[in-house]
Image (cartoon, helix red, strand yellow):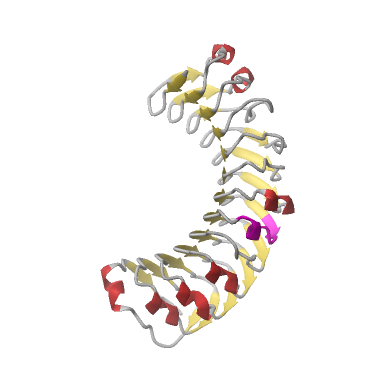
């Protein structure tokens, strides 16, 4: 049985009786006006594969499937769940887990190695990124932005060959930017932290199309290999202390937005004529 009830104006609570089903495979009730908690019995339904209760008014503790269920997709984003996230490493089937925009706090828990997409943004997570996350080798998308995470980011990404999206912005991370070689990154968002030092050459080994390093404590010149990132579309390195001449502009024919304001850049801007057809936004104020 498949129930697709999303994008309506349903209110009230999620019926506990649904937890008695033996055939329910998909339950999607996102974007409604549901209140109360998620019945634990519902998350124990062994036939359940897909569960989406995102963007409602659900409260209480976040409820997760039993270990012996076959759930591969859980989206509880955009509610008012509180408390912490339990140890999830024994959930061997789950691939997509989205908990963003809740009031969940505590440390990042142990996570299942089967994860492909992980969304934990806009919450109250604290502490550091655990080294054990290097075991999440199937990840294609990791979003830890807008939390209160801190400390140095460990070199855990080189084993994530499928990682295409990395969002760590708006935390309190310190130290140098970690090694990003060996990934498939097209989006790298590290802004609004306290990263320091120079940009590592490993960024040039990615496929970055969106690169945000704004509002950190980064210094030095950009690596000359930045010219290799021919697919770059959005660059924001504002509010750092970068120096040198940004010659890499001319190598990005598809660039649409550039913000290099509030740095120590100098020299002449060299623009590729092809950029005229794409460039929509450029800020070079106070460089």
Name the residue rendered at 34%, 79% in the picture: 271
Name the residue rendered at 60%, 32% in the picture: 81
Q: Position of residue 194 (x, y in %)?
A: 63, 65
- Of residues 123 and 230, which is closer to you in this image? 230
51 versus 209 height, above or below: above
173 versus 12 height, above or below: below
Q: Quadrant of residue 21?
A: top right
Q: Position of residue 213 (x, y in %)?
A: 53, 66
**Residue 262 appears in view:** no
155 in the magenta segment: yes
**Residue 164 appears in view:** yes
- Of residues 87 and 171, which is closer to you in this image? 87
Count of numbered badges drawn on the protein: 0
Name the residue rendered at 49%, 70% in the picture: 237
188 versus 126 height, above or below: below
Side of 41 relative to 214 (left or right): right
Side of 101 relative to 40 (left or right): left
91 in the magenta segment: no
Q: Position of residue 204 (x, y in %)?
A: 53, 71
Side of 174 relative to 99 (left or right): right
Q: Quadrant of residue 200?
A: bottom right
171 versus 285 height, above or below: above
Magenta-colored span: 150-160
Outermost residue, left side: 277
Name the residue rendered at 38%, 79% in the picture: 250
Q: Position of residue 30 (x, y in %)?
A: 46, 29
């Amino acid at each position: 049985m498949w129930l697709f009830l999303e994008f309506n104006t349903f209110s009230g609570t999620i019926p506990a009786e649904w937890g008695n089903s033996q055939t329910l495979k998909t339950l999607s009730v996102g974007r409604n006006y549901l209140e109360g908690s998620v019945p634990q019995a519902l998350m124990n339904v062994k036939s359940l594969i897909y569960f989406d209760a995102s963007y409602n008014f659900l409260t209480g503790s976040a409820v997760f499937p039993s270990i012996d269920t076959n759930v591969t997709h859980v989206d509880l984003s955009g509610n008012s769940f509180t408390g912490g996230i339990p140890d999830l490493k024994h959930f061997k089937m789950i691939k997509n887990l989205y908990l963003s925009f809740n009031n969940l706090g505590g440390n990042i828990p142990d996570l299942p190695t089967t994860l492909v997409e992980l969304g934990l943004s806009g919450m109250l997570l604290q502490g550091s990124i655990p080294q054990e996350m290097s075991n999440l080798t199937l990840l294609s998308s990791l979003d830890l932005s807008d939390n209160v995470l801190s400390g140095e980011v460990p070199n855990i990404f080189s084993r994530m060959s499928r990682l295409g999206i990395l969002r760590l912005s708006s935390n309190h991370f310190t130290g140098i930017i970690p090694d990003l070689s060996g990934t498939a990154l097209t989006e790298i968002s590290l802004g609004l932290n306290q990263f320091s030092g120079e940009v590592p050459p490993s960024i040039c080994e990615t496929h970055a199309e969106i690169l945000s390093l704004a509002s950190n404590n980064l210094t030095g010149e950009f690596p000359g290999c930045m010219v290799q990132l021919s697919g770059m579309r959005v660059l924001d390195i504002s509010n750092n202390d970068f120096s040198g001449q940004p010659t890499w502009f001319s190598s990005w024919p598809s660039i649409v937005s550039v913000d290099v304001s509030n740095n120590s850049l100098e020299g002449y801007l060299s623009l590729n004529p092809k950029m005229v057809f794409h460039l929509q936004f450029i800020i070079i104020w106070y460089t």
